[in-house]
């Protein structure tokens, strides 16, 4: 069941849409979505669009997308064809390393020394 709840914080009242359900036989809030202050809700009901004061952008799937494109282009295979087979004392071929470095430059460019930290 959904309901609108208010929370006071530093003298301001904020409203949330809360969904309740029974968890372990007891009523609990299972999700809540921020609606804003009363003035924000009133403006939204009047049809006005309120721009957020700040946003947080998260990269999701960017590395997977970059690697997918590089693999369709067969970058690692092309580099390995020119360079030759990998040495026995390394875990990946030169083409694989080049593929990872290109993905890094596309997604989150950093120095060569910082690459291993980024990859982890």
Image (cartoon, rainbow, N blue to C red):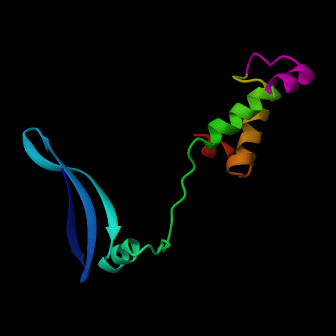
Residue located at (73% from left, 19% from top): 89
Give whichever of 77, 66 is nearer the camera: 66
Quadrant for the C terminus, please: top right
Point out residue 40 in the picture as x, y percentages from the top left corner.
37, 76
Point out residue 14 in the picture as x, y percentages from the top left corner.
28, 73
Residue located at (50% from left, 73% from top): 51
Identify the magenta region: 76-89
Which residue in the rendered view is the most extreme toward the bottom? 11
Q: Is residue 81 left or right of residue 12?
A: right
Q: Is residue 59 left or right of residue 67?
A: left
Quick check: can you spot residue 72? yes
Q: In this picture, is 47 found above or below 56?
A: below
Q: In this picture, is 44 found above or below 33?
A: below
Which residue in the rendered view is the most extreme toward the right? 82
Q: In this picture, is 96 found above or below 42?
A: above
Q: Is residue 49 left or right of residue 5?
A: right
Residue located at (51% from left, 65% from top): 55
Quick check: can you spot residue 94? no
Residue 83 is inside the magenta segment: yes
Point out residue 76 in the picture as x, y percentages from the top left corner.
80, 26
């Amino acid at each position: 069941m959904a309901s609108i709840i208010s929370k006071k914080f530093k003298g301001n009242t904020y409203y949330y849409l809360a969904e309740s359900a029974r968890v372990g036989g007891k009523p609990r809030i299972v999700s809540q979505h921020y609606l804003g202050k009363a003035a924000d809700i009133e403006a939204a009901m009047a049809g006005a669009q309120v721009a957020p004061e700040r946003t947080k952008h998260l990269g999701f799937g960017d590395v997977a997308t970059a690697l997918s494109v590089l693999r369709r282009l067969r970058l690692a295979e092309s580099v390995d064809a020119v360079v030759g087979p990998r040495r026995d004392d390394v875990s990946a071929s030169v083409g694989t390393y080049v593929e990872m470095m290109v993905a890094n430059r596309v997604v989150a460019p950093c120095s060569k020394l910082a690459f291993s930290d980024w990859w982890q």
